[in-house]
Amino acid sequence: MARAMTIQRTTVTASERANYFARVKACQSHYSAANCRFHVFEETSLPGAFIEFTEADDPTTLTVAHANSPYRILDPARIYHETEIG
């Protein structure tokens, strides 16, 4: 089965930045232990605008990891699957 991924957008004010990074550090640790990959990207031209990607080798692993996450996921059922091109 193809890899599965969720995407979440977050906007953080300058005063919330330290708390946000503490949260995503905990998320990274959680998802790594759950056999998932967790990446955070910040928009270059808009500091504080982040996109979080959580990826697993299959939808079940991703769903279970989100269910056990230390933080609420806005839309954990919105899972994208890898699609072959061509």
Image (cartoon, grey):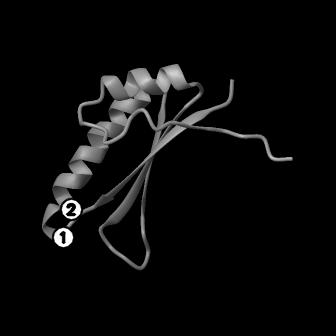
At label 2, the amino acid type is Arg
Residue at 33% in and 24% down: 67
At label 1, the amino acid type is Ala
Q: Is residue 56 found left or right of 30 in the rendered image? A: right
Image quarter (top left, top right, bottom left or bottom right) of the N terminus: top right
- Verify CB contact (< 8 Å) between mark 1 and mark 2: yes
Q: Which of the pair 83/35 is nearer the observer? A: 83
Give the structural element (helix, strand or loop) at label 1: helix
Give the alpha-carbon distance from disc 1 to disc 2, as whole Å: 5 Å
Task: Estimate the x, y position of residue 35 in percent, counting from the top left.
Answer: 48, 25
Residue identifier under label 1: 14
Residue at 59% in and 27% down: 57
Task: Estimate the x, y position of residue 11 in percent, counting from the top left.
Answer: 28, 63
Residue 17 image label:
2
Q: Which of the pair 24/50 is nearer the observer? A: 50
Residue at 15% in and 61% down: 16
Q: Residues within 10 Å of mark 2 (few under 14, many from 20)?
A: some
Q: Which of the pair 57/25 is nearer the observer? A: 57
Position of residue 16 relative to residue 85, above or below, is: below
Q: Quadrant of residue 76?
A: top left
| Outermost residue, bottom side | 45
